[in-house]
Image (cartoon, rainbow, N blue to C red):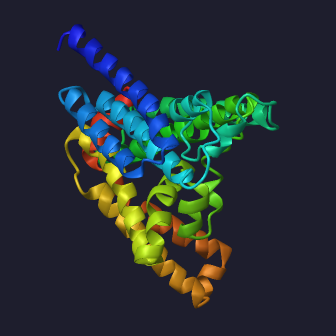
């Protein structure tokens, strides 16, 4: 495909996201919630069609970015329902474009004094970015070893998933949090020492990817829990998270449909089972070591459903500049 259409598609992506910010502020000011959901669906469909014939990596990036921008509108409209909007347009635009979290309130103080721990978050993030790139170098070196190809594939895939998580989740997002704190926004770590989680509920709600937990809590769980009950609302929230991961992991490679959704439905079911076990004070969950083994098992064993083969082969390995021999 020639460079002119690619340039036009990228221009459309930028224009669409800018329009989401402009229209979204009006939606949020007027608490237009169902209209925000319509805007989300339109944005996803239009960006999907525009980049339908592009490569998997660029499709993944534009789908994720557009979905996050549109979800900011839904989340902010829900957050300020029945409350006066405390964000200026400048603060809203910074939140919508420049921050991965889904709570707009931290940006109400944007433009104020520098907040504590800004530089420590930046240093923390930089160290994780360097660690991630070091792991990618390790993966490249492993490719030269005479190891069985199947074993090598599993080893390198695990290393690359960890590397990209360090670079993005613990690195760039931590740097972002620190940079915004320099400008007065009360931003925070979105990934908070997940290895310390002793329950799946703690892992998903308080430690791993708070952007997603905030998103599903604000837009799905809280609006539904009084109507459907906590258990149904929780399953729907996990299923919604699964659908968003379908957009990021299955749609770009046109394969693996339903697998990320199944992964998150399993997580939701196990969280509900876990709550029942904790209520009954089952002993193994009271032991910190066994509790962490429980969490690790349910996160990792079904993980091939989430990061399915075609996504690994078309996105993860190429991002690292690797191909199987």
For residue 242, what is the image quadrant?
Answer: bottom left
* Residue 172: % across, % down: 58, 32
- Residue 77 position, x and y percent, is 49, 48
Q: In this view, does 204 lie to the left or right of 184?
A: left
Q: Can residue 78 be seen in this view?
A: yes
Q: Can residue 325 be seen in this view?
A: no
Q: How many marks?
A: 0
> Closer to the camera, 163 or 167?
167
Quadrant housing residue 47: top left
Q: Quadrant of residue 41?
A: top left
Q: Which of 201 and 234 is in front in this view?
A: 234
Residue 167 location in percent, x, y? 55, 35
Task: Tell me which residue sits at (59%, 66%) in the image.
Answer: 202
Front residue of 223 and 152:
223
Residue that appears at 32% across and 55% down = 260
Asked if residue 47 is positioned above or below residue 74 in the image, the reply reads: above
Measuring 52% from the left and 41% from the top, which residue is drawn there? 29
Left or right side of 124 for 70: left
Tell me: residue 224, above or below residue 10: below
Q: Residue 139 appears at what percent x and percent y?
A: 45, 35
Q: Is residue 323 left or right of residue 257?
A: right
Q: Which of 295 and 14 is in front in this view?
A: 14
The quadrant in which the C terminus is found is top left
Left or right: residue 212 compared with residue 128: left
Pick the quarter of the image with the N terminus. Answer: top left
Residue occupying the point 35% across, 67% down: 265
The image shows residue 282, relative to residue 116, as above or below, that is below
């Amino acid at each position: 495909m020639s460079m002119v259409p690619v340039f036009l598609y990228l221009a459309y992506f930028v224009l669409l996201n800018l329009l989401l910010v402009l229209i979204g502020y009006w939606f949020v000011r007027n608490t237009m919630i169902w209209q925000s959901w319509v805007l989300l669906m339109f944005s996803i469909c239009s960006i999907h069609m525009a980049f339908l014939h592009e490569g998997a990596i660029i499709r993944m990036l534009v789908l994720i970015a557009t979905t996050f921008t549109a979800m900011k509108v839904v989340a902010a409209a829900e957050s300020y329902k029945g409350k006066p909007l405390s964000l200026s347009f400048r603060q809203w635009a910074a939140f919508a474009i420049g921050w991965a979290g889904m709570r707009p309130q931290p940006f109400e103080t944007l433009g104020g004094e520098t907040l504590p721990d800004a530089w420590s978050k930046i240093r923390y993030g930089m160290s994780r970015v360097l660690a991630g790139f070091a792991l990618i170098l390790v993966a490249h070196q492993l490719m030269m070893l005479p190891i069985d190809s199947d074993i090598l594939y599993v080893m390198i895939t695990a290393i690359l998933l960890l590397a990209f998580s360090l670079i993005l989740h613990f690195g760039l997002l931590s740097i972002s949090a620190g940079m915004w704190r320099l400008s007065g926004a009360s931003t925070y770590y979105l990934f908070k020492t997940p290895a310390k989680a002793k329950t799946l509920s703690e892992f998903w709600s308080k430690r791993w990817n708070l952007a997603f937990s905030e998103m599903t809590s604000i837009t799905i769980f809280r609006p539904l829990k009084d109507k459907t009950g906590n258990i149904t609302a929780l399953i729907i929230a996990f299923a919604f998270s699964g659908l968003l991961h379908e957009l990021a992991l299955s749609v770009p490679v046109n394969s693996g449909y339903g697998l990320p959704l199944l992964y998150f439905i399993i997580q939701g079911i196990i969280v509900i089972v876990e709550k029942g076990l904790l209520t009954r004070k089952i002993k193994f969950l009271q032991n910190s070591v066994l509790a962490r083994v429980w969490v690790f098992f349910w996160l990792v064993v079904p993980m091939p459903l989430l990061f399915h083969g075609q996504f690994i082969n078309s996105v993860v390995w190429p991002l690292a500049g690797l191909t199987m021999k």
